[in-house]
Amino acid sequence: MSPDFQITDFHLDVLKEIGNIGAAHAATSLSQLLNRKVDMYVPSVKLVTFDEMFELAGGAEEHVASIFLRIQGDVTGSMFFMLSIESANHFIQLLTGDEAFDFHQPPVSEIGASSMQELGNILSGSYLSALSDFTSLNIQPTVPSLGVDMVGAIISYGLIEISQYSDEVIVIDTEIRENDNPDTKAIKGNFFLLPDPDSYMTIFRSLGVL
Amino acid sequence: MIARNEVVRVGISDMNIVKAGKTIRTSGLGSCVGIVLYDEFKKIGGMVHIMLPDSSLDRSKKINEAKYADTGIYTLMEILKAEGVRPMSLKAKIAGGAQMFQFGSSDTLRIGPRNVEAVKSELKRLSIPLIAEQTGGSKGRTIEFDPVTAKLSIRSVNEEPIEI
């Protein structure tokens, strides 16, 4: 990032809109996949320290299931779609009919793990293609990878590029949630989009707000 | 009632020290490495949670020493020296450096093993003996050190805690 460039509230609002558009498309995909209504929450965009980033995701030690991919092309960065273990289990049980599936008890079935990966594929794909359409930028995801572990261990891997420039990161955080499920097992997940420092300028330039 | 030890928390790219009566802890190490330097007679120890192998990678305006293996270990040693610890009596235990994901550019992919190598070579450069390690693999770790027993306890998801 150019040293004299200051990110203003206006820029954060633009990034919020990106979270809005991306997650809205992902919510639609999830809704089609489950044949259930899915809600999306207003995104939050924050400049946070790495430790605060872990707190946003439930704390460094929290056990989660997360899809992780890198973004390549005109914009680079890291993207996570993160679910609690309970949400991930519930999703896989719905999709595969395997009621005994449990990430808490590895090794897990291959079909379960690959349907989780496929969920990540579909949701991040629709998020990023919406983003690409909106900005007219070339945005390519890598093949998503599934990690089931502690928040800190997973997210720090996506911070490696950023950490060479800064001790802080801009997080575009959007939550999507299955709607009409009265029990507490409703599927709920968060997208965390972490653009690399050079990429903000590219995004702002393409949207004409620089 | 049993008095519980107070825990000093170390964040990512962060360091701190601890004396008898308290323990020191860092959570969610993935490819990062947690390094403990300690003096078992003075019962004092320090912990640094590094992310990257070498401070020559730094492109920021102001370097955070705790982020890198080379500057992190050196600075922690200096802090302990300022507390009256002789460098000769320092020992080290380390944990972390896992490979969490199976993709990425080759540099990023190998960041865990590279961190571990860099930590070992810096310890060697400073002549600090490495007493125990639990590194590599593909699981995250939370570690906690007690300067009285000089034991480092390590927890991973779905596994029994171990002590080194």
Image (cartoon, coloured by chain):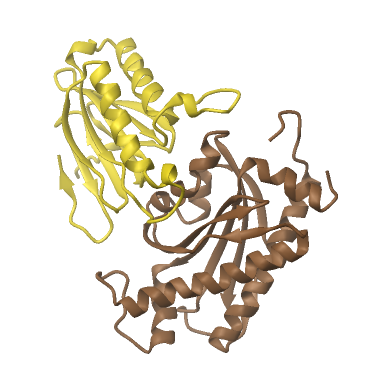
Q: Residue at x 55, y 64 (%)?
A: A190
Q: Position of residue B56 (x, y in %)?
A: 47, 24
Q: Position of residue B116 (x, y in %)?
A: 29, 35
Q: Position of residue A80 (x, y in %)?
A: 52, 59
Is residue B31 positioned above or below B46 on the image? below
- Looking at the rendered image, the quarter that the N terminus of chain A falls into is top right
- Looking at the rendered image, the quarter that the C terminus of chain A falls into is top right
Q: Would residue A41 be visible to someone looking at this image?
A: no
Colour brown, chain = A
Q: Chain B drawn in what color?
A: yellow
Quadrant of residue A172 within the rendered picture: bottom right
Q: Residue at x 31, y 42 (%)?
A: B97
Horizontally, residue A95 falls left or right of residue B88, namely right
* Front-lying residue, A64 or A127: A127
Q: Residue at x 74, y 40 (%)?
A: A7
**Number of labelled discs?**
0
Is residue B26 positioned above or below A77 on the image? above
* Front-lying residue, B13 or B32: B32
Q: Residue furthest right?
A: A208
Horizontally, residue B60 falls left or right of residue B7, namely right
Quadrant of residue A124 within the rendered picture: bottom right
Q: Would residue B106 be visible to someone looking at this image?
A: yes
Quadrant of residue A173 within the rendered picture: bottom right
Horizontally, residue B43 falls left or right of residue A196, namely left
